[in-house]
Image: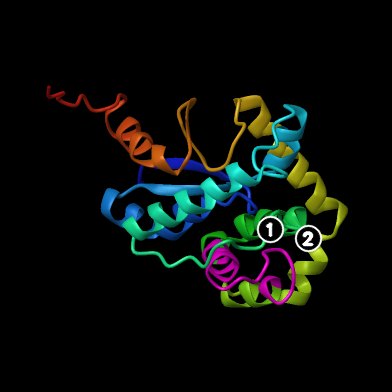
Amino acid sequence: MKPSIDFWFSIGSTYTYLSVMRLPEVAAKSGIHFVPRPFSVRSIMREMDNIPFANKPVKAAYMWRDIERRAARHGLAPRLPAPYPLREFDRANRVAILAAEEGWCEAYLAATYRRWIEQGEEAGSEPNLSASIAEAGGTPSRVIERAASDEAERSYVAATDEARRLGIFGSPTFAVDGELFWGDDRLEDAIAWRRDGRLDRRETRP
């Protein structure tokens, strides 16, 4: 069995784009399976009175430029700024909950982020939603109906409660045996911890 890392995310997090788009290559190179764990980071951030970019134009401008720089490093081609924040944040993530249960979450994530960040189609809304579900192998009408059900909402709340219990407060977060690594720039640290139980020591030079 492959070693695994829990990949906690909310569609709606802009920085999560960087992780979603490079995880397949990272997984292939590292031999690690990343378990998709969708949750509502928005709920947790509201509880913490932490709204990092809304109504903060200077900080938002930095965010978009930072993503653009980091995306170039990984050969990605975002079209920024993308629509933000998402109007259908919860619907996008309830679909992800179902996709994770049914085994097509990775494909859905890649499709919805590509359409959102690279093509300007807002995640969770049409035409992104149906197209991304179909590309991932789901039936849009069935999935969208299930995502609106009380059962899907209960699963979404339960996932968010688990994230809260673990101390997760941002997306993406990589969880390894109780150790949390927040942010795309901590992905390699999570892999090192999974492999060695510690971070690599690095030489410092004057």
Residue 115 drawn above or below residue 149: below
Type of amino acid under label 2? Ala
* Residue 24 sits inside the magenta stretch: no
Q: Are marks 1 and 2 in contact (CB under 8 Å)?
A: yes
Q: Is disc 2 surrounded by few (<14), some (14 to 19) or many (20+) residues within 10 Å?
A: many
Q: Which residue is mark 1?
A: 98
Give the image location of residue 9, x and y in percent.
Answer: 58, 46
Type of amino acid under label 1? Leu
Lateral position of residue 71 relative to residue 168, left or right: left
Question: Which residue range is magenta in the image?
Answer: 108-129
Checking the image for residue 154, the label placed there is: none
The residue under the point 27% across, 29% down is: 196
Lateral position of residue 109 relative to residue 30, left or right: right
Q: Secondary structure at mark 1?
A: helix
Q: Nearer the viewer, residue 175 or 187?
A: 187
Q: Nearer the viewer, residue 52 or 111?
A: 52
The residue under the point 29% across, 26% down is: 199
Give the image location of residue 182, x and y in percent.
Answer: 49, 34
The residue under the point 12% across, 22% down is: 206
Q: Secondary structure at mark 2?
A: helix
Q: Which residue is mark 2?
A: 147
